[in-house]
Image (cartoon, grey):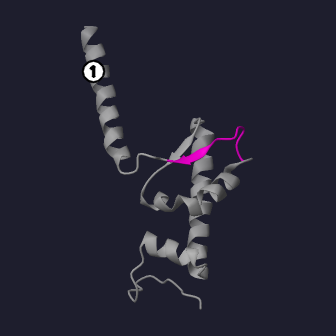
Amino acid sequence: MQKELTEGDESEEYTAKSVFEAYERKEEWAVTIISNFVDKLSMAIIAACAVIDPEVVILSGGVMNSAQFMIDEIQRKVDGKLPAQIPIVVSQLKAKATVLGGAVSLIHQTADYCIIRSMY
C-alpha cells in the first residue's frame, strides 16, 4: 500500500521517528522521503566542502539519532565528488553541542576583545 503525503494532510501526524520506523518496515513512501533527504544532504555537504575544505564533517540534530540508516549512503554519495575524501561522522555531543558551541564562541569573542583592548 502506497501512502501519499500531501500538503494539509492531517489524517496522520508524521514525525522523524515515525518516518524512520516506516523506513525500517520498507514502506515505499518513507523510503522515498529518506532517499530524497540523503540526496539533498549529500549535495549540501559537497557544496560546503568545496568552499571550506574541512578535515571532517560532523552531523548533529534530531534526525541524526537515526543516522545508522543514512550515514553510509551519505558517505558513498560524497566520496569521489571532492578532491580529497572527507570523513562524515555523527556528533557524540547530541543536545550538548549547541550549548558547548555557544560557550566556545563566547570564550573566543571575549578573548579577542581582551587582546584588542590590551593593545591600546
Say above or below: 110 vs 92.
Answer: above
Q: Residue 93 appears at what percent x and percent y?
A: 41, 45
> Residue 25 is drawn in which quadrant?
bottom right
Q: Please identify the quarter of the rendering in which residue 120 is found.
A: top left
The vertical placement of 73 against 85, above or below, is below
Quarter location, residue 39: bottom right
Boundaries of the magenta span? 81-90
* Residue ID for mark 1: 113
Q: Residue furthest top?
A: 120
Could you say which is closer to the camera, residue 42 or residue 50?
42
Q: How many marks?
A: 1
Indicate whether 47 appears above or below 32.
above
Residue 100 left/right relative to 36: left
Magenta span: predominant SS is: loop
Across and down, in percent, residue 74 comes to: 63, 56
Mark 1, other Cα within 10 Å: few <14 / some 14–19 / many ≥20? few
Position of 26 compared to 64: left or right?
right
Look at 32% across and 21% down and name the residue there. 112
Q: Say which amino acid is labelled 1.
A: Tyr
Residue at 44% from the left image edge and 82% from the top image edge = 7
Q: Position of residue 13 (x, y in %)?
A: 39, 81
Nearest the eye: 119 or 100: 100
SS at mark 1?
A: helix
| Most distant residue in the right direction | 80
Q: Residue at x 62, y 43 (%)?
A: 87
Q: Is residue 34 above or below residue 61?
A: below
